[in-house]
Amino acid sequence: MVNQDQINAMMRNFPPEAELLQMSAEDVGMHLLKYMTRGRAETNRFNFLQMVPGGQVAFRFMEGWGWLVRQGFLALAPNDMYGQNHFVTRAGEAVAQQDDLDAWRKAHLFPDYFDAALQRWVKPLFARGDYDTAVFRAFKEVETRVRKKSGFKTDYGRGLMLKAFGETGPLMAGDVEGRKAAREMFAGAISFCKNPSSHHEIDFDDAREVVDMISFANQLLRIVDRL
C-alpha cells in the first residue's frame, strides 16, 4: 500500500499541484517524459496512478500520458496482456534529451506536408528560432523554382516574377487574366516577404505568424509546380 511519504516523494518530480491543474496536456506530458527517462521511473500506468494524488491531479497526469502516446513518445510494452506497462520510444528519448524543449515545440508547429525543399532547408532554421532567415529561405526557394520553370537563368527577385509572368513571359501564357493575377501575387510576395527584416510591422517573435508566411511560400511553390 502506497503511503503519503511515497506520494510526496513522487510529486517532487513534478511542479506543484496548483500549477499542474492549470497546465495543458502537452506541458504535463513533457514533465512526464522528463521523469520517465530518469532511472527507476514508474512507467506502469496503474502503478503510477497509485503514487500520485487522486482527483483532478490524476486526470491531468492521464491527459499528459495520453498526449505522449498520441505523439509516439510512449508505447505499450510488448507482451503486456493488461495494457499497463509502457516504455519511452526512441522518438521520446530524443525529445527528452533536448536541452531546449521549446525548440521541439517550435519545430512541431512546422507542418509535415510542406514542400520537401522547405522541410530540408527552412525547417531547421525555424526550429532554432532564426525566423528572418527561415522566411527569406522559403521565398528564395520560390524564386529558384520560378527561375527554373521559366528558363530565365540570370534574372532574380521582383524583376524575375514580372518577366516570367509578363505579357511575353513563358508562364501561364494562355491565360491573360490568370497570368496578370499571378504576376502581381508573385512579385508582391517576393518584394514583401523575401527580405522580411525590412518590414518592421512583422513580429518575428511569433512562431505561428512565421509559419503562416512560410505556408504562403509553400502555396506559391505548389502553383509553380502545377504550371
Image: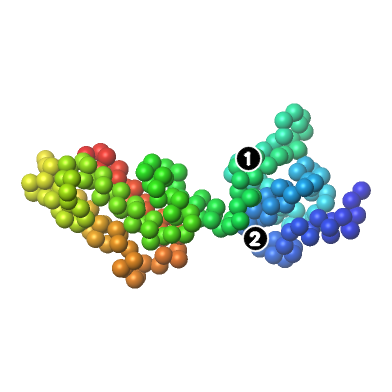
Q: Is residue 73 left or right of residue 52?
A: left
Total numbered labels:
2
Residue visible at 21% across and 45% down?
Answer: 147
Residue named by callout 2: 23
Q: Residues within 10 Å of mark 2 (few under 14, many from 20)?
A: some
Cα separation, mark 1 vs mark 2, equals 25 Å
Q: Position of residue 177 (x, y in %)?
A: 13, 49
Above or below: residue 72 compared with residue 125: above
Q: Position of residue 43 (x, y in %)?
A: 75, 43
Residue furthest to the left in view is 168
Q: Is residue 23 visible?
A: yes
Which color mode does the image show?
rainbow
Residue named by callout 1: 90
Q: Residues within 10 Å of mark 1 (few under 14, many from 20)?
A: few
Which structural element holds mark 1?
Answer: helix
Quadrant of the frame with the C terminus: top left
Which of the two marks, 1 or 2, is nearer to us in this view? Answer: 1
Which structural element holds mark 2?
Answer: loop
Amino acid identity at mark 2: Met
Q: Position of residue 89 (x, y in %)?
A: 65, 40
Residue visible at 16% across and 55% down?
Answer: 159
Q: Is residue 181 visible?
A: no
Q: Position of residue 152 (x, y in %)?
A: 16, 45
| Depth order, front residue of 154/73 | 154
Residue visible at 17% across and 49% down?
Answer: 154
Earlier in the chain: of badge 1 and badge 2, it is: 2
Q: Is residue 186 left or right of residue 173?
A: right
Residue visible at 76% across and 57% down?
Answer: 13
Are the residues tagged 1 and 2 within 8 Å (C-beta)? no
